[in-house]
Every structure is written in C-alpha cells, then in structure tokens.
Image (cartoon, rainbow, N blue to C red):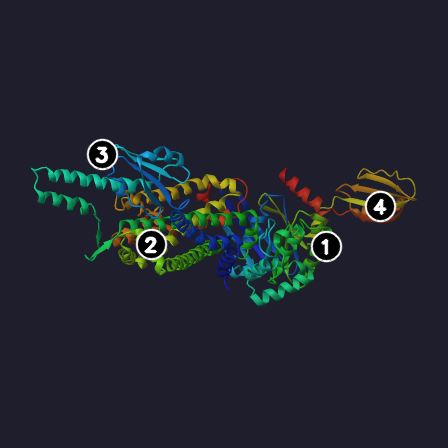
Amino acid sequence: MNTLGLVIEREYITRVRKKSFIILTLLMPLLMVALSVIPFWLSTLNEGGVKNIAVIDNTGTYASLLKSTDSYKFQIVEESGQQDQESRLGKDLFAILQITGDLNVNPHAVSLMSEKQAPQELQSIIVNTLTEKVTQQKLDELSTSSNVDAEAISRVRAIVEDGSKISLRTLRMGDDGSVQESSTELATIIGMIFTILIYMFILLYGNMVMQAVLEEKKSRIVEVMVSSVKPVKLLIGKIVGIGLVGITQLVIWGVLLGVLFGGLSFFISSPEKAAAMSADMGDFDMEGLVNLIESVNWFEIALYFLLFFVGGYVLYASIFAMFASAVDSEEDTSQFMTPVTLLIMFAFFAGFYSVSNPDGPLAFWTSLIPFTSPIVMMVRIPFGIPMWEKLLSVLLLYGTFILISIFAAKIYRVGILMYGKKPSIKEMIKWVKYK
Amino acid sequence: MYLETKEVVKQYANHLALNKVSIQVPRGTVFGLLGPNGAGKTTLIRIITRITAPDSGSVMIDGRPSRSDDVYNIGYMPEERGLYKKMKVGELSMYLAQLRGLSKKDAHHELMKWFKRFDIMDWYNRKVEELSKGMQQKVQFISTVIHNPDLLIFDEPFSGFDPVNTDMVKNEMLRLRDEGKTIILSTHNMESVEELCDNIALIHQSQVVLQGKVFDIRKEYRPGIFRFRILGSEFDFVHPSIEVLSREPYHEFIDLRIKKMENMSSNHLARLIFDRYEVVSYDEELPTMNDVFIKTVTGNAR
C-alpha cells in the first residue's frame, strides 16, 4: 500500500474507533429527535388535566357561547355564588371569567382572574368567541336601523366570516420559464440547516486537523514520520482522513435521522393518532406540505452541499494545519486562529442575514467570496439562484483552495520541523521559498 | 565510499546552517557525526535523509546521486522522537513498518522477530502512553531498523536508556555493522564514540573542522604525555625539554606523567628515562575523544 493510503487509513481508523466519536455519532440523532418531539409531546400534556373556568356573566348573553374544549371546561355560575368561587380559585378552579356589562357598549367590561398566568391558548379562545359575538351584535344593530340595505349587511356578514382566511401561495419561475410552487419557509429551513451543518463541520473538523498537527509536532512523532513520508502526503492524508470521518458522521446522522423520523411518523400515522392530529391541526394542508417537500430539488441541494462542504473544509483545514505547523503549543495558536475563526463566524452571520434577503448584495457577494461562500451559498441555493452564480462560486472556491493548499503545504513542510520561537507571518512567507 | 556529501550548503533565513560540508562514510563502518549543539548536524542528517534539500552540493550514495526511493533504504532515528501516545504499541509499529515500505505480512514477521529479541512481546497490545521512556526508545529503535536498510542514522540513540539497555543497543549496532550496514551515529557521548566509531567528522559553526579515522585523530591530538612506572622511591631527574606533571608513589614504584616539549622525540625521552631508572611499564597517553572535541571546538572559536 502506498504511504498516502496508510496515513489516511490511520487518521480515519483511530478517530472512528474512539469512544467519544461513536457516542456522539449515535446519540446526536436521538438527541435531535428528542429535542423536536419532546416539546410537542409535552404541549399535549395538560398539567392537572382539564382546567375549570368559572364564567360569571352578568349580562347572560355570552356565557353560553363559550364552548368547552379538551383542555378547558367553562362552567356558568350564578351571581350569587361569586364569593364561593373566589375561595376555590387555585384549587379545583383555574380561572374566573367575569363579564360585567354589555361588551357591545363597553369593550373593557370583561376580566379573567387566575392564580397563574393564563395561557395564550385560553386567552385567544375567549377573545375570539367574544369578538365574534360582538361583531354579530354590531351587524344586527346595523341591519335593524332602517337606512341600511339588508342585502349589503348580509354581504358584509359573509365578508367578515370568510374574508380573513387568506393563504399566500408563493410561486417561483425556473430558469426554463416553468412556474413551480415554492415555500419560502421551507427554503429558509433547508438553507439554515445546511448552512449550520457546514459551519459546524468547518469549525469542528478544522479544529480537529489543527489538533492533529499540533499533537504530532508536540510529541515529535513528526520527526520520525517525515523520514519515510513526504510532509505533503502527511498533510493531505490528515486532511482527507479527518474529512472522511466527518462525512461518515454526516451519513450516519442522515440515515439515523431518516429512520427515527420515519419510525416516528409511522407511529403517529396509526389511525386514531392521525385522527387526533388532523383534528388538532384543523385545516392544515398536509397534502400540500408533502407536495412542497417533493418540489424541492433535493438532488441539486445534496450535490452543492457536498461540493461546498468539501471545498470549504479543505480550504479552512489547510489554513488551520498551516498555522498549527508553525507554532509549538496550543497557546501560541490563538494569535493566528482568532482571525480565521472570526472569518468563519462572519460567514455564518452573513448566511444568517441572507435568509431574509437571499438576493441582496450581502448575500450575493459573500456567496462568491471563497472564504464565506461555502457557508452563505447553502442559504441561497434552496431559494433558487441562477446557474452562473453557483458555478462561479464553486470555481472560485476550488481555485482558491488549490492555491491555499499548495501555500499551506509549503509552510507546513518547514513548520513541522521548526521549534522554538513563534514565527511571524513574514518569516512564514520566507519559508515558502525554502528548498 | 557508501555515502558522500559534496560541498553541501544550506542557508536559512538568518543563518548559514551548512557551509560546504563534505563527508565520506565508508561502507560497513560506524561513522561518528560530532559537533556542539546547533553546529548543523541535524540539518546535514535531514539532507542525507532527503527531508530537506540542500541549496547547493550533492549527496552521493554508492557513487551515484541519491534518489527519492533511497529513503526506503535509510533508517533514521531522530534525536527528538515521539510516538502516537494513544495507539497500541503493536499497531503503531505495524504502521511505521508499513510506511517504511514493508508489506503487511513482512512487517508482522519482522516485528515478531524484533519484539522477541528485545523481550517486549508483552507490550504488543499495550498503549504507548503506558510505556516508560526506555521502552518507547526500544520501540523507536525497532521501527528504525525494521525494514533492514543499508544506511542507519542514529541521533543521540542512548538518551533515556539505562546502562543495560545502552549496552544492548550498542551491541545491536555493532551486529548490524558486522552484517555490512553503514551506520551514522550522532552523539555527545564521547565514550561511545571511542567504543563504536571507526571514523568521525566534527562539525563546528556549520563547517567540517575535523575528519578521519578515530585512531588517527587521537594520535594526531596526542598531547605528548607519557606514563612511566619506575622502581624506586625517588625521581629527581630534570631536563629543559621535559616537565613532570605528577609523581605518585605506588607500593615500591613511582607513577610518573611526563610531558615532553615538541622538539624532543619520544624515543629520546624514553632513552633518557630508561638510562637512569628501572622502568617497569611505559606508554603514551592518548587523548580521549572528549579532549579532542573540547580542544577543537574551543581552539577553533579562538
């Protein structure tokens, strides 16, 4: 086997076998599923089951309109029992709703008293019910007054009832002029997920490369290595080996997440659960969501993700390795690493703000500049951008990473065998010229 | 000559590491590469092992310029040496052996041989970080010689070894030499130079200041001191060309150390003493390599 293959194999095997890697790789998807499922599950739990709400309606108009739900039970109480109710508050009674006057005349004549903060859900049930009733009352009054056309009133009623149900469909015109239904929300979510992934992996695995170079230099094993392996091969082997570890982790995460969410949705889609879900979601367009997910060009996104992932990782890993080779200890790395880390953070924030305006100048330029493009471009691709921008960005990134890696390799070659004084950037540039 | 460097020059940013360094290493001998710290020894070794390239000059192996695949025929044990601490001894040794060009099968076979010879079979599945420094040195020694190279370069090979292991390594080196391997030994331990080396080169301030056979060099650096053991209790001979450095009674004898002036031949001195006293034994003091080293380096600094 050639030496490069051996180096890659060692870098890969020793890392993949580590307990910390196995645990992180297996636990992360479980954690992610748990993080997305548990809040949902918790929200379906009612603390103490059904909450009782006493309704004291002095007008007698509104109380009967409040429909009890799974979570809230409205009990109509006579005025006489009022004192009694207050003493029960916080025990078997969650809240007291008091309507003191005609809301049509005085909109403030209603109050909700509870020991704990009343949940948003309860508040909106009450407000919506009462608002609807008051609207009806006002329209009724209007229609009884003689100078308004009855026809017009019924039209207004219809408008009030249906008119507010607007759903905005967003369409996107493709390069070939075809119009596709798109979802900005979905594009945002996809873009953010891939951007965060690339950002995370560049930082995490770039640092891993740095640590590996430092460890070899500190333990002086590098002196033993370079007598049989060319430093350039050592560097390439390290970057490739660690990159493969990253890809392995990504693939395992992808498969595990797919299996877990698949299993979960199968579990949820059992008949009675499905019924409960659709009841919860009301008129939520499940079919539409599936169509939307299918409308995303996953192949394209995966392809570009891979391209930008590899380009970005190699670019930054070379830089990390270059600086690590030039110093003797971790403490000395910070002077060189801080600007690099800041650059990556800047790219992340540029990506973050590009979501709201994926075709703005910030998004455009940062997705072309090689040091930020791997992170920012992933935000923009799900929104659909012209082919030439994508190609130019990839070309610039790969051109730069080839140049930077050659430069980094030259520095690395000299740096790993230099001990003592921390070199300045100027000295490091001189190293490039060494034979 | 197995290995020759010709007028090798290496310039770093602000200092000249090697200034026209030429050395000749005959095949099947141990060659001592000596010099004070920072003289340029490590740079020269790195050029021979092709880790760095010279700015000018050349390295010849077996009479032809050295090639990139020569590295598989060189075993180099650097002075600053380490191992991957988290790896198992056996795995790491396999890895290093394979990097040096052995197939997996050959690497395993050779490793077993060496692990048995050094009696460290028990360590095969232990982690490197559990090993003592001396143990690690043994592993490093094995990985240096595992691919049976014709040229071996040891930079301070004895540091960290106890006397027993030092002896073992010395014997291994001599055995390898007798098998026809050529060995370059760089060390500050002058006793081992006298013991092991056939030839040396002394590098000082980036230049070779002394080169040749160890015995010739020691002869050349003779300080002109002779030791006599004479019978009797008194010695009061005075001569303008001799200086008595010490006289120590020893049972019925006196031990003398006499330094002669340059203008007097050693035969003349011997005759002078032999004519006057009953001499039991007589020899010339040869300088130790330590003396030669110090004299050359300090004398050269002027």
Q: Chain of mark 4?
A: B
Q: Which residue is mark 2?
A: A277
Amino acid marked by disc 1: Asp
Q: Secondary structure at mark 4?
A: strand
Q: Nearer the viewer, mark 1 or mark 4?
A: 1
Residue identified by numbered label 4: B228
Q: In this picture, is B97 found above or below A90? A: below
**If you read the primary sequence from the N terminus, does the residue marked by circle 2 or circle 3 appear first?**
3
Marking on residue B167: 1
Q: Amino acid at mark 3?
A: Asp
Q: Which residue is mark 3?
A: A102
| Image-based side of A148 in relation to B19, left or right | left
**Spatial separation of the CA atoms under disc 4 and disc 3:** 135 Å
* Cα gap from disc 4 to disc 2, whole angstroms: 112 Å
Mark 2 lies on a secondary structure that is helix
- Measure how far apart labels 1 and 4 are at the Cα level: 33 Å
Badges 4 and 3, same chain: no
